[in-house]
Amino acid sequence: MLKWLRILLLLSGGIFIISLVLAFTTVPYYAMYRLAVAKVKPVKDPAVIVLLGGAGMPSENGLMRCYYTAEYARRYPKSQVVVVIPGNLTDSSDSPLMFAQELKVMGVSEERVSFENKGRNTRQQALNLAQRWQVKGTGRPLLLVTGPEHMYRAVASFEKAGFTNVTGAPTFESSVGEDMMQFNDRELKGNRNIPAIGHRPQVRYQFWNHLKYEVNVGREVFAIGYYRLKGWM
């Protein structure tokens, strides 16, 4: 038992050290980027913009997805918008209607918005929409709006459900210019025995963002593996 515990601790320590080292490189960002663009094709007049809700509302990624959905809704004014997130459509404080309200604030009219609030994961949501649109056909152009790391699995899941014309809009965030994040430690005074990091945004921001990317990508790789084993994508 102690032998296996020792092996587990060594393995965990090795993974932790590798994660720390990778966070100082661009590997985590490009791993997420590849998940975001691997199955994305050029957008050609989508009939439906599908907002996959993620963490709900209010949340950072919820607002990001609303922003991108509203932008594409303005670009393609004839498209319909479907808010895909589980919740109660009679409760204005629940996520689906909060998403719809945010879209309205961003300029998307209520008449364009419908809901798929029954599915509890990407697979079930895709199947529910495929069943709903059997009469109109699943060949209509769909644009999925979701987080970058989730895009590959989302598009593959909708294709597996029978949709034949699917692409995506990954919700990449805009970064502040590196020069705007630098400062002069000496001007701010304080303890001069502590190393100056004002000119090192990679230590103050990039390292921590990349650790977050590693967690997101790791979770998504696990989810992709599960979906493949289940035959859901």
Image (tube, rainbow, N blue to C red):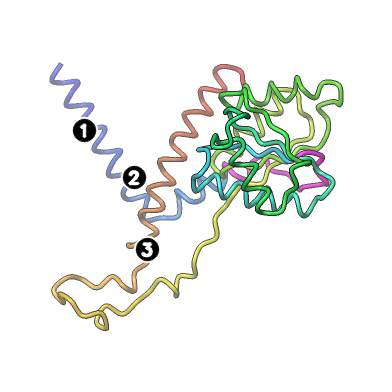
Marks 1 and 2 sit apart, C-alpha to C-alpha, by 14 Å
The residue at 34%/69% (across/down) is: 200
Residue closest to the eye, 207 or 134 = 134
Q: Which residue is mark 2?
A: 19
Q: Is 7 rendered above or below residue 97?
A: above
Question: Residue 13 falls in which quadrant of the image?
Answer: top left
Question: Residue 206 falls in which quadrant of the image?
Answer: bottom left
The residue at 61%/23% (across/down) is: 119
Q: Check disc 3 and report its element: helix, strand or loop.
A: helix
Kind of residue sitting beneath label 3: Gln
Q: Check disc 2 and report its element: helix, strand or loop.
A: helix
Which label lies toward us, 2 or 3?
3
The total number of labels drawn is 3
Question: Residue 207 falls in which quadrant of the image?
Answer: bottom left
Q: Which residue is mark 1?
A: 10
The magenta region covers 35-48
Query: Which of the two discs, 3 and 1, labels the residue nearer the N terminus?
Result: 1
**Outermost residue, bottom direction?**
187
Q: Which residue is mark 3?
A: 202
Kind of residue sitting beneath label 1: Leu
Is the C terminus in the top left, top right, bottom left or bottom right quadrant? top right
Kind of residue sitting beneath label 2: Ser
Where is residue 190? Give x, y as percent: 18, 76
Crowding at dot 1, Cα within 10 Å, few <14 / some 14-19 / many 20+, comes out as: few
The residue at 73%/44% (across/down) is: 41
